[in-house]
Image: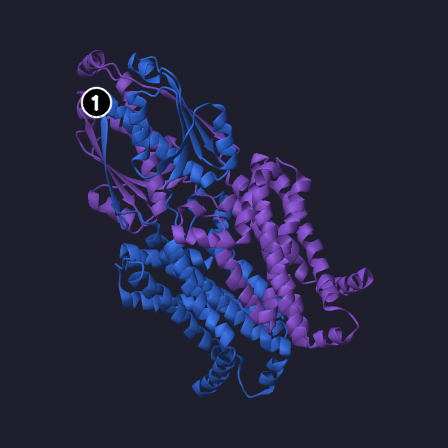
Amino acid sequence: MSPDIMLTIAKKEWQQIRRDTFTLLISVWMPFVLLLLFGTAITLDIRNIAIGALDQDNSQLSREMLFRITSGGYFVINKRLSNPEDIDYELNSGGANLAVWIPEHFSENLKKGRNPSLLVLMDGSDNNTAGVALGYFQTLLQGFLSEMNKGNLPVDVKDRVWFNPELKSTDFLIPGLIGIIMMITCTTLTALSIVKEKERGTIEKLMVAPVKPVEFIIGKILPYSIIAFVDFLIIFLGGIFIFGMPFNGSLLLLLVLSVLFIAVGLSYGLFISSLTGSQQIAWMVSLLTTLLPSMILSGFLFLISSMPYALQAVTYLVPARYIISILRGIILKGNGGIELLPHILPLIILCTGFIYGSSIMLRKRPAG
Amino acid sequence: MIRQVLNIAKKEFILLRRDRKMYPILFIAPIVQLILFGYAATFDVKNVPVAVYSNDNGSIARRYLEMFTASENFVITQNASNINELEKAIISGPAKLGVVIPSDFSKNIRRGKTGAVQFLVDGADSNTGIIVLNYAKAITQAFNEETATTLNSWKRRAMHLLFPRIAFDPRIRVLYNPELRSADFMLPGVVVIVLFVTTTILTAMSIVKEKELGTMEQIIVTPLKPAEVIAGKLLPFIIIGFLELGIVLSAGATIFNVSVKGSVPLLFCLSGIFILTTLGLGIFISTITHTQQQSMTMAFFIIVPMVLLSGFIYPIKNMPEAIQYLTFVIPLRYFLVIIRGIFLKGAGIGVLWDEALILLIIGLFIISVSILRFNKRLA
């Protein structure tokens, strides 16, 4: 291996990238746009759920109850309905997500201990919002009830929330976003750049040149690792300085591990490029196998323990799963020791696996 | 005119048929997406690991913890022997909830006093954190109800006589998706995404490929009109779009048992309007890029923000107001409302006409701008 040759190839690649200002622009713009989207527009916090209220009791107690439900900011009363037929229309047209129907004599029956019923209708078509909204709703109702029962509960709860006490979803999403962007850019850029040479036949010219395959590959992916590192910095620094993401861990450790993340992405891109000779397919495969699994099967948004077991098993093969755990561990929890090992080791194994796999595939087709 | 269009469409089909490697991507990818979004993309909170630090071996404390184990939401994975161990379980994982029970818990409750429990929640995952806390509190509420009615404490009985407990019975009914299955919610969304991604990218790529290979010039010198070229090139992708729609619909019905509540012909009709916008977008991308790689990157750059802002996973209502206005120009937004309405609520054109109209206007606008740009470049 000669560093000179590698640098020459890296230089050639860099010139090609520079000439293609379009791709360069997008690989730097994309993370920035995504950061802005996830920092501002996209939030998992469910607030302002629209209620259509039909209060036929119209007593002090029923008004008090509705006030209590809406006071936390989770629910707003969108419409006061006057007859039961309106409920259907409101839910069907999406004017309200939830309808509360307080029947006549509700408070009177309640005070006399007659256990009056309260009808709650929920639009379940968005199951996520509906599930969370129901949870809030029941907690608020129970809180209202136990207050009316003058406390004296057998068990009283004090809760403390760690790492993200305001439970802001931005703090949770941005570290995950770093992992996803790095996987996508590293993988697609590497796969495309190598496949492009295959498609144009320029790879044969390089093969007959006195360049070893290792030198060729390292030289080729060097510029892309720099782009990926810049992407990493954009999201990380943007997250901290624009969106106030906390940083509780060791910067040095994060930087060292980011090299590992880049290596995994690059080796996977290499593996894809060894499987196919067409840019179109390389692009589709790398997007399909990085974007979707990194977003869905990594714990970025969805809890892995809630998935069916077969899919839980698949998540062990998704590098983003480990990358995101490490990023959240360091950034939010200040992890910095032995507890990160269970995430680091699988990444090393996956990385070697991809490199080994692509070397086998390349050897099978020596002409490329 | 029609003959010319059909001839070009035929040529395009032959090209597509030869590209065997695209088959799995065209037809398997939608099903993979369906499975991923249907099964994995769920905000359900189940089997959450819980660490417990309890100094109380009394029967009441045990009963309280039993209620955690009995719920499908929690699994007690660790019994910590001191508070440090409990904290460590949360810091280094896997526990997301820590429950601390003091030594006088059972004793206090038996005497009619209040037992104090502490919850430690890993808030790093804000969404799960909130839900976990809600569930844990709900379990505590249930335990309180149970204890208040069953426990024989003279003090509690006296309280009961003095202040009879009042209660009401909330009857909760969930409409349209009573089991709150994510497949029901996701499937219509996946239909939209699959249609959007494949038709946009395929259109852009097929035009740019001709540019890249230089065959576009050959077509231009033939006596074909630009409109015929475009119509002929788009026809196969319209057909593929409808094919994919059919695949996802039938896969959804067989794998997930989600079937369309409303009218299927209406669904196909309105999908036709939507495909107009995606094809227009594809042509537009092809006019601003020169190579296949560029057009793929550009397509990605346009598609991802559109999907994120469309309300596919994240409700538009939760976004800041300025961004909510931005979503009005995203055609996906309207089509999602249409397709979810038809799928889940069985809505008809009477409820959906306004979305359909806006979609049609956006579609006509995009496609005419793109064709104008395309013509200008050919001239």
Q: Position of residue B211 (x, y in %)?
A: 66, 74
B136 vs B186: above or below: above
Kindly identify the amino acid type of the residue bearing the numbered disc 1.
Lys
Q: Quadrant of residue B157?
A: top left
B179 vs B241: above or below: above
Q: How is the image coloured?
A: by chain
Could you tell me which chain the residue with mark 1 belongs to?
A
Q: Is residue A167 left or right of residue B43?
A: left
Check disc 1 and report the residue beneath it. Answer: A150
> Which residue is found at the position 41% from the left and 74% from the top?
A226
What's the colour of chain A in the image?
blue
Secondary structure under badge 1? Answer: loop
Any part of residue A360 in sight = no
Q: Quadrant of residue A276?
A: bottom right
> Which residue is found at the position 21% from the left and 11% from the top?
B161
Q: Position of residue B136 (x, y in %)?
A: 32, 35
A313 vs B107: above or below: below
Given residues A322 and B164, the one toward you in this image is: B164
Given residues A261 and A124, the one toward you in this image is: A124
What's the colour of chain B in the image?
purple
> Mark 1 Cα within 10 Å, few/some/many (few <14, many 20+)?
few
Any part of residue B253 in sight = yes
In which quadrant will I find the C terminus of chain A? bottom right
Q: Is residue A228 left or right of residue B257?
A: left
Q: How many marks?
A: 1
> Which residue is found at the position 48% from the left and 48% from the top?
B311
Q: Position of residue B192 (x, y in %)?
A: 58, 50
Q: Is residue B196 left or right of residue B129?
A: right
